[in-house]
Each structure stands twice: as C-alpha cells, then as structure tokens.
Amino acid sequence: MEPKNIKKIGVLTSGGDAPGMNAAIRAAVRAGFYYGLEMYGIYRGYEGMIQNDIKKLDSKNITHVLERGGTFLKSARSEEFRTAEGRKKAYNNLKSHGIDALVVIGGDGSLTGAHLFYQEYGIPAIGLPGTIDNDLSGTDLTIGFDTACNTAIEAIDKIRDTATSHDRLFFVEVMGRDAGFIAIYAGVGSAAAAILIPESKMPIEQLVDKLKTRTKAKKSSNIVIVAEGGKSGSAQEIADKVKKYLPYYDIKVTILGHLQRGGAPTSFDRLLASKLGVAAVEGLMQGKYDV
C-alpha cells in the first residue's frame, strides 16, 4: 500500500496489562521522534479514545519506564467501543487531535478492535502482541509472557520449599485464559508432577495413578500445575476430586492470580517489546497498515 502522509501517531494499551508494555510504548514514541512525528498517548485504551483522554507525549513521559511493569498509559476494557456509536465517537476524537495512525498494544480483543476500526474509518493501525497468555495466532512469543513464566516459576519454587518440608501435595493454578502456555513453561521449568492445560483433558484417574506412582517412588512432595480455563476444572475442583481418591494426602491449593501480570519485565521482554515498538512505527511509515 502507498504510504500515507503520517504526522501524528496515537499509542494505546488495551485489555489485560503485561510486563513490557511500557518498553513497547517507549520504543514506539522514540521511533516516532526519530521520524519527526508527534506522538500521542491514549490513556485507558479504547475507553480513553472514546472519552478523549488523549495527551501529547514528550521525552519526559517515557523516562525511566523501560524497567517498570504495567503500563503508564493505563488500560481498560471498553464495552462502548464494541458499538458503532462508540467507534464513531472515538474516530471524531482522534480527528480533533489530527491523529493519522495508531499503535495498539494488547491481546486478541484489542487487535481485533484495531482491525475493525481500520476497516470502518481507514485509520492506519499496527497491533503489537501484548499479553501474558501468549495466545495470539501468528506470533511465537507475546510481550509479557516470558516475565509471567519467570514470576510463576519463582513462586512455585517457594511453594516447593514448604511442600517438601511438610510432605504436601500442592495444586498451583496459573493464568492463561484458554491457553496452557504459562502452565507448560512454568510446569516444565519447576519439575511439576503433572501439568493440566485447556488444550488436553487429563482424567482424574490418570492423575491419581501418577501421584500414587510418585508416592511409591518416595517422592516427598508433589506440585501439580493447573491452567485456568482447563477442561478438568479449577485447581480447587481438581484438588477436591483427588482428595476423594487419596484421603491420606495433605493437599493445598494456591492460585497465583494477578501476581503473574506484575513486576519488572525480564531482559527478554524488554528487548522484544523494544523491537516491536520500533517496528510498528517503521511499518506505518512504510505503508504497512492493519497488521
């Protein structure tokens, strides 16, 4: 596509936050400055676009954000953006600022919104995969996934200490929505006894047999990783079922929850986010839209 005369780019983060989003924002803004563009921050995602929470960014806004988790542009989910009226309001607000293009950092829903917005109003947009779930088609690793896995492993290692001390069985539930990537990476990385993921259902009887085998092998503790959204149920539900088969086990459940979304991004996520942020602006300048 023939490149448009882009002078102002809006950057937003949408959906669930992920470590490394700040690094991506920083890189996109710095790249924009390199090309002599005006860069705008759209606060609280699509909701901020509708509410006209849009501010021009300068170098001070992106100072010392590379190492910070979360997103300084804030994030939110917007039901109104799902409506034609909401998107029309968002478009008018962008035009009032003279914004020619968008860099959208987020998950599947966020990037779908950018695609729809481009189709309706022709606003050039490039989406960056920012989600700890790593569940976006067409990308190997998403911004935040590596940090989330490291956070989960660090927590599981600590749980292992107390599990070993008391000969306990722990069911640890990790995030991931409908995908088992965090569970697999964290489970393998922490030598879990079993890993339960949404993509594959393990019968309770099979899990029980595995735990019995480990008991016979004199394993003093067991960690079972459960991905949220799994077909076998939540960590608590699975623990309750296993307890009926193994009443003599001392069973505990830990849900890591939003702990996995926070914290300083790893070096890998900082590098990945920085590369993608620069690539987004370069892509827009080269006429690569709706990517």
Image (cartoon, rainbow, N blue to C red):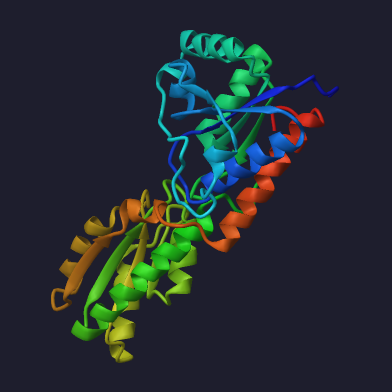
Image quadrant in which you'd find residue 94: top right
Q: Residue 119 in the image: state x and y as whole percent.
A: 66, 17
Q: Is residue 6 above or below residue 241?
A: above
In the image as oriented, which residue stretches furthest toward the right?
2
In the image as oriented, which residue stretches furthest toward the left?
247
Q: Is residue 166 above or below residue 291?
A: below
Q: Residue at 25% x, 62% y: name it.
A: 254
**Residue 252 vs residue 9, the one in the foreground:** 9
**Count of numbered badges drawn on the protein:** 0
In the image as oriented, which residue stretches furthest toward the front?
60
**Residue 125 vs residue 251, the one in the foreground:** 125
Q: Is residue 206 visible?
A: no
Q: Quadrant of the C terminus?
A: top right
Image quadrant in which you'd find residue 204: bottom left
Q: Residue 69 in the image: state x and y as whole percent.
A: 45, 51
Q: Residue at 54% x, 46% y: name it.
A: 63
Q: Is residue 120 left or right of residue 201?
A: right
Q: Residue 51 in the image: state x and y as whole percent.
A: 43, 16
Q: Residue at 57% x, 44% y: name it.
A: 136
Q: Residue 205 in the image: state x and y as whole percent.
A: 30, 68
Q: Is residue 55 visible?
A: yes
Q: Is residue 116 above or below residue 248?
A: above
Q: Is residue 34 left or right of residue 95?
A: right
Q: Is residue 62 above or below residue 155?
A: above
Q: Quadrant of the N terminus?
A: top right
Q: Residue at 59% x, 61% y: name it.
A: 268
**Residue 204 vs residue 110, the one in the foreground:** 110
